[in-house]
Amino acid sequence: MDKPQIPDDIDHPRRRFFGAAAMTIATAEFLVTGAAAAQTGKPSPVAARTSASGPKNAFGPLKQIDAGLLSVGYAEAGPADGPAVILLHGWPYDIHSYVDVAPLLAAQGYRVIVPYLRGFGTTRFRSADTFRNGQPSVFALDTIALMDALKIQKAVIAGFDWGTRTADIIAVLWPERCKALISVSGYTVGIPTATPQPPEVERQWWYEFYFATEQGRAGYAKNRHDFAKLIWRLASPKWNFDDATYDRSAAAFENPDHVDITIHNYRWRQGLVKGEPKYDELEARLAPGPAIKVPTIVLEGDANGAPHLPDDTLYRQKFAGKYAFRMLPGIGHNLPQEAPRAFAQAVVDVDKL
């Protein structure tokens, strides 16, 4: 899970994160009020929640492409010549967070790319000698490399959890590649810090402290299926997902690099391990918390079981371009899978801002 970033110039105790199936006519009908919603910043009047009765949509055969340090596994939907949308998942989730979003966007003519992050699914390192680095800036570099490999110059980039942080970093460092942004839970560009928070806040990040120990590494390696399922339940307390829905995503955690990437990511955030020196320049550019200037819609669910801010007051100033904020009632942390129609509508709307 990820935490929203508290801007530097706000008095707060810690600068951390509180963070191609065919489509029927009926599912396409919701994409009719985008312009109005974009102007008001309010969610479109669509059903927010997906059914808990098991998976309905499925991706077609996955694709694989060499991109930078990785051989990236990804799903693709929509016309090859359509405007590109890249959808980025988080931890402990996978590309199926977008399995219901992708056909909605494909039906509107978008070319939808949904990659497995490093350490998930069919994505693999091209060399056994590459350091299994989980620092956030490398996920952004991975995405840029994927865009280059797919000859995508510019895309709407959308993400939640780790995907939000990745998308936000791209918007900061490579705004020329980001046409517009969907950022779930706000501004998530940050650097490691160990400034204490109140105990009630700290306890909610128990798994970060667990991962800081060797017992935590061993425990996650042994129990990752049940561990991640617990995170799903805590992060989305009102989402009644079934075992089939969870198990479909949990298969992605069997990636041979999953544990190394997960542990390094969270230890890096705690300032317990370093990244690679070759990325120091990127981290230095991110450290001040630069404003995001591309058009952005921020989404949040009021049933997010991860700590989240009640509104966008504390980070609104970090978005310097066209902007809207939408709070979705009854929705938890895995926002695109819990509210696929609202998420897809936000992508359509931000593309028009």
Image (spheres, rainbow, N blue to C red):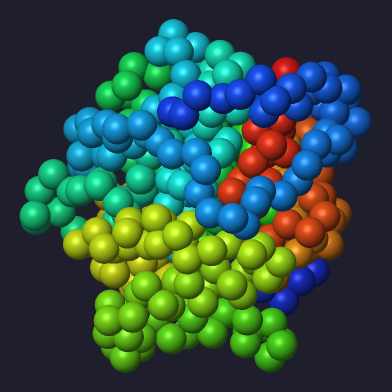
Residue 167 seen from this side: no
Judge from the rendering whether residue 6 lies leftward or rightward of residue 153; answer left or right.
right
Quarter in which the N terminus is drawn: bottom right
Q: Can you name the residue that lies furthest to the left here?
A: 128
**Residue 75, percent from left and from top:** 37, 34
Judge from the rendering whether residue 8 lies leftward or rightward of residue 317; answer left or right.
left
Residue occupying the point 76% across, 64% down:
303
Quarter in which the C terminus is drawn: top right
**Residue 250, percent from left and from top:** 38, 62
Number of labelled discs? 0
**Residue 42 vertical position relative to residue 89 in the rendered view, above or below:** above
Q: Can you name the residue that lies furthest to the front here?
A: 53
Residue occupying the point 48% across, 72% down:
229
**Residue 266 vertical position relative to residue 163 in the rendered view, above or below:** below
- Taking depth in this image into account, of 49 and 166 the one nearest to the observer is 49
**Quarter of the view holding residue 70:** top left
Residue occupying the point 36% across, 67% down:
262
Residue 132 seen from this side: yes
- Taking depth in this image into account, of 89 and 148 the one nearest to the observer is 89
**Residue 145, percent from left and from top:** 31, 32
Judge from the rendering whether residue 308 lies leftward or rightward of residue 192; answer left or right.
right
- Taking depth in this image into account, of 284 and 246 the one nearest to the observer is 246
